[in-house]
Image (cartoon, coloured by chain):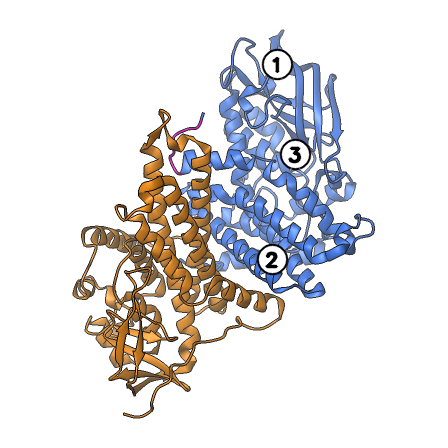
Chain colours: A orange, B blue
């Protein structure tokens, strides 16, 4: 058993952190130049031929930076449904995608192309009207699509369990990146802010909630990385691991952000500080790809009812007109 | 990153499973823990059998009778022991605390004298650290040791000492300089528990069992050779002991929680659970996996760099609170039967006993408050509260 990152994976993380600190709003062309658009795409399709574990490093760092763009929707949602030629376009940085798993579509403001689930297949949606909605987390807008035609058939709907596991694992890891940044901000503050003549971190009413926040984050990260490894290797536990990880990590990220806001006092509650953006991202993660209660109901089902995998309502089909 | 066993780890695990299947006596399976249950000869024989099969002291150096094996084998050993619901070796304090401390600070004569009988379960150890006036604040120790004619004379009282009623030796933290205070002037001794002037009184705890004891020392003569480390250097030696207490514990605790959660799931299957209870069961299962992989991350770091990852320091804190929640949830699933005493309750009162016992989990081996201080100050770098 080895639960450490390789030196190459550590280097990727370092590169990502430095780049995103210097370039908080990167263009897609910049991501393509760094090679991030083909990380988990096979070499024969123009990608780097690495695994979901390397991609997970990026989800974590993008979460930390509260990145705004179609990375999650392209790689965690749409990629498993794309045929080889379209993967090659993605790897080359020439296309971004989202996949509509319900009426609210992720990254609809930035993703160029939209895939939809219809019947037993996944299709490209063509000629639809898009409406981007305002969201609490302004860095990950959702939208609705109206009309349009089902174009090219991209994949069988049998890839949907893979899509779900991938999306949940990615969100779980992203949540850890969000929480890590929030915790660091709170620690810096607690170690420097003085009240009553002492740095506030000496007070256990301040330090113990931060110790708990760290604990929650490390537990969440262990689950998220386990889920990521299961997805990368096609492990039989991928579905249950991803469900458990997403439920746990989203709650942990929200909790860590709330502790951070409380630690910072008034300033953490304003638009003057970055914390509110981290907090809103954590809330957004909580609401995507299954709520905690729904995911835990699935975990309980597989533990208590002797079912294989986990119970799920599955994606809500979007009504489309066939043909075209 | 590869979360599967290596071929070597898989082979070790398979051999161990087969060995346990063949050698674990039925009457010892499902052992609930607690020092009182270590009294009988069956536990000694079991410990000896584990030792003879080469499973004790896996990570100890070969020169001291250990296996010289990697930490991963020790983790697998603890995991499989718990999965088989097999009791641990009786020498918990010797293996986890006294032995590693003697290896780090002992003379060659002390290593030669004390280490081998710990492994073979011929000699049992207990710990004399806490006192009525020195609990979490261990530096308040007052038990005195005066150097007189080539031996120390020890007077004082220790408390919360598991296994003291069975023990041959005690690792004892004393104050050798009466004018000293706090961390200075402390001396670490090895004390023969059968020496004149040593008296052990069991303490009946919340479960009705007596796992731990008070120890009274009245003019006890301890040979000067039984000094561990330097006179006045006892605090550093004690820190080595505590580091090992918390360091080696993680996998054993995780394995114990794994058994609890498995029993909880089987209880819910037997007796049913409503949707809210099912939600909590799923949460506890998730947190168990989180603890498992947190320990795995810390262990992988230890194997690669020689230093455990900082995330390992949360293990005991997480386990203790999880065990309290899991046992309470089990009582809730039992409904009105939860009120029955151990004699009349379903599952022979297992859950009633476990729930009461779990209240000690957030106190023993470092209270949750102290552990949060350690995380805040040593892991997160916050300013010290004292």
Q: Quadrant of the C terminus of chain A?
A: bottom left
Magenta span: B380-385
Residue A3 in sight here: no
The x, y position of residue B291, in whole percent, is: 51, 51
**Mark 1 closeness class: few <14, some 14–19, many ≥20 residues within 10 Å:** many
Say if labels 3 and 2 share a chain: yes
> Residue at left 58%, top 73%?
A307
The x, y position of residue B161, in whole percent, is: 67, 30
Judging by the rendered image, the residue that carries numbered circle 2 is B15
Residue nearer the viewer, A132 or A154: A132
Judging by the rendered image, the residue that carries numbered circle 3 is B117
- Most common secondary structure along the magenta stretch: loop
In-image side of A13 versus B187 (left or right): left
> Residue at left 64%, top 35%?
B118
Say if labels 3 and 1 share a chain: yes
What kind of element bears circle 1? Answer: strand
In-image side of B375 versus B99 (left or right): left
Q: From mark 1 to mark 2, how far is it between C-alphas?
A: 49 Å
Judging by the rendered image, the residue that carries numbered circle 1 is B144
Residue nearer the viewer, B167 or A10: A10
The x, y position of residue B61, in whole percent, is: 52, 39
Residue reaching furthest to the top: B149
Say if labels 1 and 2 share a chain: yes
Q: Chain of mark 1?
A: B
Query: Within the magenta stretch, is there residue A245?
Result: no
Residue B278 in sight here: yes
Q: Chain of mark 2?
A: B
Q: From mark 3 to mark 1, how far is it between C-alphas?
A: 28 Å
Res A145 → quadrant: bottom left
What kind of element bears circle 2? Answer: helix
> Residue at left 54%, top 17%?
B186
């Amino acid at each position: 058993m080895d639960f450490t990152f390789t030196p190459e994976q550590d280097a990727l993380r370092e590169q990502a952190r430095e780049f995103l600190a210097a370039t908080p709003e990167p263009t897609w062309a910049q991501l393509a130049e760094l090679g991030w658009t083909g990380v988990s795409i096979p070499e024969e399709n123009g990608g780097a031929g690495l695994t979901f574990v390397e991609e997970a490093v990026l989800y974590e760092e993008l979460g930390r930076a509260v990145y705004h763009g179609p990375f999650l929707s392209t790689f965690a949602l749409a990629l498993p449904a794309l045929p080889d030629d379209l993967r090659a376009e993605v790897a080359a940085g020439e296309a971004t995608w989202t996949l509509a798993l319900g009426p609210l579509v992720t990254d609809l403001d930035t993703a160029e192309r939209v895939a939809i689930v219809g019947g037993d297949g996944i299709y490209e949606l063509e000629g639809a009207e898009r409406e981007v909605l305002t969201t609490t987390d302004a860095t990950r807008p959702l939208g609705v699509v109206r009309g349009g035609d089902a174009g090219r058939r991209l994949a069988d709907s049998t890839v949907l369990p893979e899509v779900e596991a991938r999306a949940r694992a990615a969100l779980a890891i992203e949540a850890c990146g969000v929480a890590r940044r929030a915790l660091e901000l709170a620690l810096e503050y607690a170690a420097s802010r003085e009240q009553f003549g002492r740095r506030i971190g000496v007070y256990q009413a301040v330090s113990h909630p931060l110790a708990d926040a760290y604990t929650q984050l490390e537990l969440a990260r262990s689950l998220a990385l386990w889920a990521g490894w299961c997805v990368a290797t096609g492990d039989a536990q991928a579905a249950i691991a991803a469900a458990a990880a997403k439920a746990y990590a989203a709650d942990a990220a929200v909790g860590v952000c709330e502790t951070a806001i409380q630690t910072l006092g008034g300033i953490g509650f304003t638009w003057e500080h970055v914390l509110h953006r981290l907090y809103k991202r954590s809330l957004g993660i909580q609401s995507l790809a299954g709520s905690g209660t729904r995911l835990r109901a699935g975990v309980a089902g597989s533990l208590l009812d002797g079912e294989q995998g986990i119970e799920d309502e599955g994606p809500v089909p979007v009504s489309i007109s066939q043909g075209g | 990153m590869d979360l599967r066993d290596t071929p070597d780890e898989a082979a070790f695990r398979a051999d161990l499973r087969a060995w346990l299947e063949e050698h674990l006596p039925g009457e010892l399976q499902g052992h609930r823990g607690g020092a009182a249950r270590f009294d009988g000869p069956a536990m000694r024989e079991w410990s000896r059998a584990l030792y003879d099969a080469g499973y004790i002291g896996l990570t100890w150096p070969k020169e001291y009778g250990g296996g010289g094996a990697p930490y991963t084998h020790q983790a697998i050993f603890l995991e499989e022991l718990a999965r088989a619901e097999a009791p641990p070796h009786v020498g918990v304090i010797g293996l986890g605390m006294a032995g590693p401390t003697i290896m780090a600070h002992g003379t060659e004569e002390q290593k030669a004298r004390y280490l081998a009988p710990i492994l073979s379960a011929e000699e049992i150890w207990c710990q004399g650290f806490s006192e009525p006036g020195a609990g979490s604040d261990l530096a308040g120790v007052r038990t005195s040791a005066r150097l007189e004619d080539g031996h120390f004379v020890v007077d004082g009282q220790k408390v919360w000492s598991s296994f003291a009623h069975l023990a041959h030796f005690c690792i004892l933290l004393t104050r050798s300089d009466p004018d000293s205070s706090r961390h200075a002037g402390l001396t670490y001794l090895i004390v023969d528990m059968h020496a004149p002037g040593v008296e052990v009184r069991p303490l009946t705890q919340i479960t009705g069992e007596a796992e731990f004891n008070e120890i009274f020392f009245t003019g006890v003569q301890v040979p000067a050779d039984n000094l561990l480390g330097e006179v006045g250097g006892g605090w550093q030696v004690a820190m080595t002991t505590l580091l090992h207490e918390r360091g080696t514990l993680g996998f054993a605790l995780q394995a114990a929680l794994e058994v609890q959660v498995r029993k909880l799931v089987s209880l819910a299957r037997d007796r049913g659970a409503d949707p809210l209870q099912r939600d909590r069961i799923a949460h506890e299962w998730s947190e168990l996996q989180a603890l498992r992989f947190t320990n795995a991350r810390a262990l992988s770091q230890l194997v690669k760099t020689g230093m455990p990852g900082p995330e390992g320091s949360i293990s005991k804190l997480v386990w203790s609170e999880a065990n309290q929640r899991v046992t309470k949830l089990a009582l809730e699933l039992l409904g009105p039967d939860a009120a029955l005493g151990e004699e009349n309750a379903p599952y022979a009162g297992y859950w009633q006993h476990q729930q009461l016992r779990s209240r000690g989990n957030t106190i023993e081996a470092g209270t949750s408050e102290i552990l949060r201080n350690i995380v805040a100050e040593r892991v997160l770098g916050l300013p010290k509260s004292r």
